[in-house]
Image (cartoon, rainbow, N blue to C red):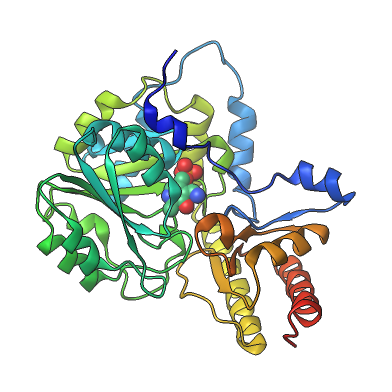
């Protein structure tokens, strides 16, 4: 059997370490996972109840049109129901976009570092990948525009960007869209949309009418706390959503996941409370970094990428022994730093104390 040649130089996605593995390896009872930007406050109680009530009839295929969730979101977002496409996480929508728009001879443009799945899926489709380095954590939008040529099919704008956390503001996004050729698909990945607080953030939905080549990606994995259930969605003009829906697997979002997402979206109290806590704990972490003289990228997300006077791996390994899983910058193309998801207050206080003692003993930062 002969797989496509490109697979010879690729490897599977390396997720953050799993809680059970770390527990066993270090003989610890409690592990705090701050590696994958999940919601430390879990998910709405209403979701919990709805799931218990609807955990049945697994013999029936799910609603392939996700009617209830689609109607809710189209109402809330004021878009046509058919402008929505649902995926098994926004990961799957990224895969579909690459399947639909990329092939050998085409190219696609993205920032580096940015979310790894854009490149991964583009390579599988045989497209050339042009990576434009971020500037101080921000997309180099001019560099990305300059890289567009007649073979470019997609530009990926991760905003706020994973792993840096930096947001593309309204003015910059509009100016980019004005200058970008209208036959190039612009993907604005807003996986961390709910965490944005900046007053300069774009209202991306309102740009859909003006820019027919735009698609917005959002997810239930982060602020809504449903990462394990795998629900993401894209919002675009019909010419895009209709073709993505052809590429989509017929029953790609399970019934339970559709139910959970529908209930989660309506529990505004849970969302607000978890966003409030996250913001408070993020400010606490930034103050701590400032006191320690550590620099970090601007963040409009539920994580911060902090730069270190040592390798990210060294701090990562040390924190593992103390029961904290963070993400080393090594795997994210930025070796002297770590990305830390904002967790619960008490856990963050312990993490800060552990970081302090590591930095004092290993690199002399007091
Ligand atoms: N986009 C970005 C920027 C992300 O950080 C992630 C998750 N880490 C995803 C997309 C995929 O999220 P999901 O598939 O869980 O919706």
The residue depicted at 45 percent of the width and 28 percent of the height is 253
Residue placed most toward the observer, 339 or 317 = 317
Question: Can you give x and y, in whole percent of width and height, for residue 184 in the image?
Answer: 15, 48
Indicate the quadrant containing the C terminus: top left, top right, bottom left or bottom right: bottom right
Residue 364 in view here? yes
The residue depicted at 46 percent of the width and 66 percent of the height is 165
The residue depicted at 47 percent of the width and 63 percent of the height is 195
Furthest-right residue in view? 27
Horizontal relation, residue 196 to residue 144: left or right:
right
Q: Quadrant of residue 80?
A: top left
The total of numbered circles placed on residues is: 0
The residue depicted at 72 percent of the width and 85 percent of the height is 365
Residue placed most toward the observer, 245 or 10 = 10
Q: Quadrant of residue 234?
A: top left
Horizontal relation, residue 77 to residue 210: left or right:
right
Question: Can you give x and y, in whole percent of width and height, for residue 267 in the image?
Answer: 51, 50
Q: Quadrant of residue 233?
A: top left
Question: Can you give x and y, in whole percent of width and height, for residue 270 in the image?
Answer: 56, 55
| Above or below, comparing residue 2 to residue 107 in the picture | above
Question: Can you give x and y, in whole percent of width and height, for residue 355 in the image?
Answer: 74, 74
| Above or below, comparing residue 19 to residue 37 in the picture | above
Residue placed most toward the observer, 204 or 267 = 204
Residue 78 in view here? no
Indicate the quadrant containing the N terminus: top left, top right, bottom left or bottom right: top left
């Amino acid at each position: 059997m002969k797989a496509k040649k490109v697979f010879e130089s690729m490897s599977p996605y390396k997720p953050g370490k799993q809680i059970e593995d770390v527990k066993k390896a270090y003989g610890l009872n409690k592990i705090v996972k701050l590696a994958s930007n999940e919601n430390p406050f879990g998910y709405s109680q209403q979701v919990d109840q709805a799931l218990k009530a609807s955990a049945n009839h697994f013999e029936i295929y799910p609603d392939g049109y996700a009617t209830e969730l689609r109607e809710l979101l189209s109402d809330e977002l004021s878009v046509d129901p058919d402008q929505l496409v649902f995926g098994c996480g926004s990961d799957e929508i990224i895969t579909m976009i690459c399947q639909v728009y990329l092939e050998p001879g085409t190219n696609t443009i993205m920032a580096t570092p940015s979310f790894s799945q854009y490149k991964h899926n583009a390579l599988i489709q045989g497209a050339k990948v042009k990576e434009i380095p971020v500037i101080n954590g921000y997309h180099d939008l001019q560099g990305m525009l300059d890289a567009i040529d007649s073979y470019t099919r997609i530009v990926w704008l991760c905003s706020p960007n994973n792993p840096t956390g930096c947001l593309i503001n309204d003015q910059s996004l509009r100016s980019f869209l004005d200058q970008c050729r209208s036959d190039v698909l612009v993907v604005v990945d807003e996986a961390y949309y709910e965490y944005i607080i900046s007053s300069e953030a774009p209202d991306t939905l309102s740009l859909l009418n003006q820019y027919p080549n735009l698609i917005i990606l959002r997810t239930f994995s982060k602020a809504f706390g449903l990462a394990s259930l795998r629900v993401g969605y894209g919002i675009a003009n019909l010419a895009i959503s209709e073709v993505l829906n052809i590429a989509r697997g017929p029953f790609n979002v399970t019934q339970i996941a559709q139910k959970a997402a529908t209930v989660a979206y309506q529990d505004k109290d849970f969302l607000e409370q978890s966003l409030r806590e996250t913001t408070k704990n993020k400010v606490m972490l930034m103050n701590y970094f400032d006191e320690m003289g550590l620099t970090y990228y601007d963040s409009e997300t539920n994580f911060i990428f902090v730069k270190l006077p040592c390798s990210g791996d060294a701090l990562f390994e040390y924190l593992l022994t103390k029961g904290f899983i963070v993400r080393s910058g090594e795997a994210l193309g930025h070796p002297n730093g770590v990305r830390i998801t904002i967790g619960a207050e008490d856990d963050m206080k312990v993490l800060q104390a552990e970081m302090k003692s590591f930095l004092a003993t290993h690199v002399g930062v007091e």
